[in-house]
Image: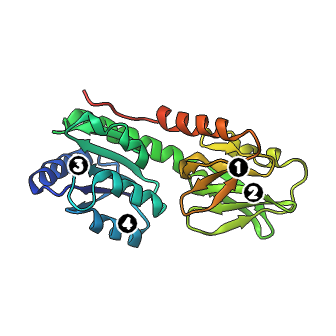
Amino acid sequence: MTRMALCDDEAGQREAVGALLRAYVAARPSLAVKLSFFSCGRDLLAAAEDCGGFDIYVLDMVMPDLGGIELGVRLRELGCDGAIIYLTVSPEYAVASYAARAFYYLMKPAEPDKLFQVLDQALAELEKKRAACVAVRTRDGVERVRLDEVVYAELAGRTVRYHLADGSSLESVTVRGPFQAAAAPLLADRRFFLCGASFVANLFYVAAVEKGALRMDGGARVPLARGRAAQAKRRWSDYWLDAPGGEAP
């Protein structure tokens, strides 16, 4: 089941875009999609916190009380990693949308063909993320962990500890050989960055690159080896700039 949320404070816009989303789902009977509509950002935040987040968010950029950018940032702070698609009346918000790690932004009124194309892309990315996993050998056996759930991994003694988006962690059995070799399945994915001899971080969950560490969503700080900060900034920037993104016509 794919969960999709629309948030727009204007009833007319909410109805118009909602009708497009219903048409999109109806035209793709093989998809299992649950649509939820919200008139304010705070209601969406509460629902996301309650259900663990949505897979796709279609957000108005300008709303009273809680604007689209702030709403997107707050969703990320909750650990919600769903694709955010912004609807905007002005291209001036395009750069600001990166603060919330937007998947795409579209000019209002949304053109059906373009919106449907973006939704197809978001769902394709979602399926790729769901399929990408790492097998972790633990004392209880092998566990498959989705890469999009791994916030960062660290060498803890002679084991690898995986810190997950839900706040839990998973520890491997004793590893033999260098940490980088044990982390190779993560590093093969462009989302992950080798921070030093003992840490790998998921760039999706990086909130800021600081002098000697990456500050992750939720407040954890992953140490950066000396001289790695500049490369981390480039990789983090490239990750988001190279991600699917829209531009206003």
The CA distance from mark 4 to mark 2 is: 29 Å
Upstream in sequence: badge 2 or badge 1: 2
The residue under the point 32% across, 30% down is 247
Q: Nearer the viewer, residue 86 or 229?
A: 229
Q: Earlier in the sequence, mark 4 or mark 2?
A: 4
Mark 2 lies on a secondary structure that is strand
In-image side of 14 versus 239 (left or right): left
Task: Name the residue that disc number 2 marks.
Answer: 154
Q: Which dot, 1 or 4, sits closer to the camera?
A: 1
Of mark 3 and mark 2, the one earlier in the sequence is: 3
The amino acid marked with disc number 4 is: Ala
Cβ atoms under marks 3 and 2 closer than 8 Å: no
Q: Is residue 145 above or below residue 42?
A: above
Q: Which residue is mark 4?
A: 48
- In the picture provided, is 112 more to the left or to the right than 191? left
Q: Classify mark 4: helix, strand or loop.
A: helix
Q: Which residue is mark 1?
A: 200
Q: Position of residue 83 (x, y in %)?
A: 40, 48
Disc 2 to disc 1, how far (Cα)?
6 Å
151 or 138, which lies in front?
Answer: 151
The reply to whether callout 1 and callout 3 are in contact (CB within 8 Å) is: no
Q: Residue furthest front?
A: 211
In the rendering, which numbered label is found on residue 150?
none
**Looking at the image, do the residues carrying marks 2 and 1 touch, with CB atoms under 8 Å apart?**
yes
Q: CA distance from mark 1 to mark 4?
A: 28 Å
Is residue 32 at least partly visible in the picture? no
Neighbour tally class for label 3: few under 14, some 14-19, many 20 plus, Cα within 10 Å: many
For the image, the number of numbered tags is 4
Q: Which residue is mark 3?
A: 21
Q: Secondary structure at mark 1?
A: strand
Question: Which of the two labelled residues, at mark 1 and mark 4, occupies the earlier sequence position?
Answer: 4
Q: Amino acid at mark 3?
A: Leu
